Amino acid sequence: MNGAPGCSPGERGALPKRRWYRGVFATSSPMGAGSSFLLRKGWVAVKDVEALRSEALAGIAAALDEATLERARVEWLGRKGPLMDALRGIKDAPAAERRDLGLALNRLRDELEAAMAARQAELRETALAVRMQAETLDVTLPGRPRALGGPHPLQLAEDALVRALRQLGFRLAEGPEVESEELNFEALNIPKDHPAREMHDTFFVADLPGYVLRTHTSPVQIRSMRAHAPAPVRIITVGRVYRRDDDVTHSPVFHQMEGLAIGEGIGMQHLKATLYEFCRAIFGRDVRIRLRPSYFPFTEPSAEVDIGCVFCGGNGCRICKGTGFIEILGSGMVHPHVLREGGYDPQIQTGFAFGVGVERIAMLRYGIDDVRLLFQNDLRLLRQF
Ligand SMILES: [Zn+2]
């Protein structure tokens, strides 16, 4: 301890102040020949209270922030501080001095607490003033609006397709994107040696033999039929499909929407009427449609569906390649093999199906000429919708 017996006042003055008092009171020893403190059994003389007072007030005044002030509070007013030591020492003081000493020390405690509070208020005010200076806020500036997201053009197209078919009484059905080869191919009349299987450049699942990333949404047709046969079904399904294509008009992941209706007495006329209403909902009331004979393994007969070119009104332009028509979907009457796979008797129930690429609809609706733009998440494109 620095306040060890025998220290001269000169040496004492060179010590850090806060350790000086600590030493005096902690050791309860005389400070040496020149000490003004009369310490006996840990009590301090009344005349020495003034020295304690000036030291403590200087310590409080020296605190330049609240943390330092808090340290000063612990140091001077804390349970192990000199004031508490002195208060505890009153009982050891001579009876004649005890009353005055108690009064003086209690007055000192009140004074120090008031000084602490005053200094704290002062420091807070200064800190606030500094902050106000640093963080000038112009409340007249306009606010910063939070940026809101918007639906992706693919989502917009998908919503429009689903809405159009829901109005015609179709119910939304779902299926997995990792699909069995059986549902993706065989049940849809695409056997292993079928040339259409060559057209589907398929992603196989390495750790799951017999499974593929579905190459079309048609497996959902089989799933829905098997869930409902022999009752009639009228469903739409929409979602991601996968093929190993990648160019201006093909992306390895793309979206299909398809519809299926099965029941007794359903014929080509129902297909055509449904497609007509569907196309009018998507492309406008005045749209014209045209069915061309085509081939798909899962429908017989099959038809490609064209709409009158929405860009030139049928006069012929670059986009319709001068024909006045744009191909938008494939359709047909459900193949008897597919009906049987779904649990229906083709002699009793018949049905139609059609499928459309969501990207193609989005590109036509919004005049986008490269399918890959839809997957690049470039805000310059997306902000236009
Ligand atoms: Zn055209």
Image (tube, rainbow, N blue to C red):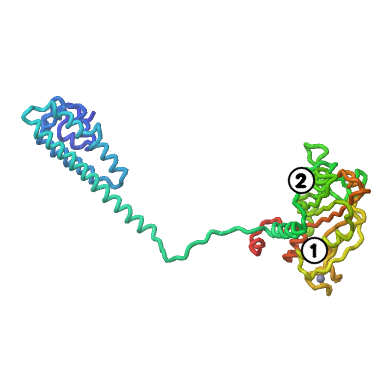
Tell me: 163 left or right of 336. Answer: left
Q: Please, what secondary structure does the residue beneath circle 1 have?
A: helix
Compared to 225, does 301 lie above or below? below
Q: Sequence-wise, which precedes: disc 2 or disc 1?
A: 2
- Residue 13 visible from this viewpoint: yes
Seen as rendered, the residue at the extreme top is 41
56 up-or-down from 98: above or below: below
- State the CA–CA distance, disc 2 to disc 1: 26 Å
Quadrant in the picture for the N terminus:
top left
Q: Residue at x 87, y 66 (%)?
A: 290
Residue in the picture at 13% in, 27% down: 91
Outermost residue on the bottom side: it is 315
Quarter of the picture containing the C terminus is bottom right
Quadrant of ligand 1 in image: bottom right
Task: Give residue 137's mark.
Answer: none
Q: Nearer the viewer, residue 341 or 313?
A: 341
For discs 2 and 1, the disc positioned in front in the rendered view: 1
- Toward the viewer: 274 or 369? 274
Contact between marks 2 and 1 (CB within 8 A): the answer is no
Query: What residue is disc 2 on?
Result: 175
Q: Which residue is mark 1?
A: 277
Number of marks in the image?
Answer: 2
Q: Quadrant of residue 44?
A: top left
Q: Report x, y in % for residue 15.
A: 22, 36
In the rendered structure, the answer to whether residue 231 lies left or right of residue 84 reads right
Where, by quadrant of the figure, is residue 258 drawn? bottom right
- x and y percent of residue 136 in the render? 39, 60
Identify the secondary structure beneath mark 2: loop
- Residue 318 is at least partly visible in this image: no
Q: Left or right: 104 with respect to 358?
A: left
Type of amino acid under label 1: Glu
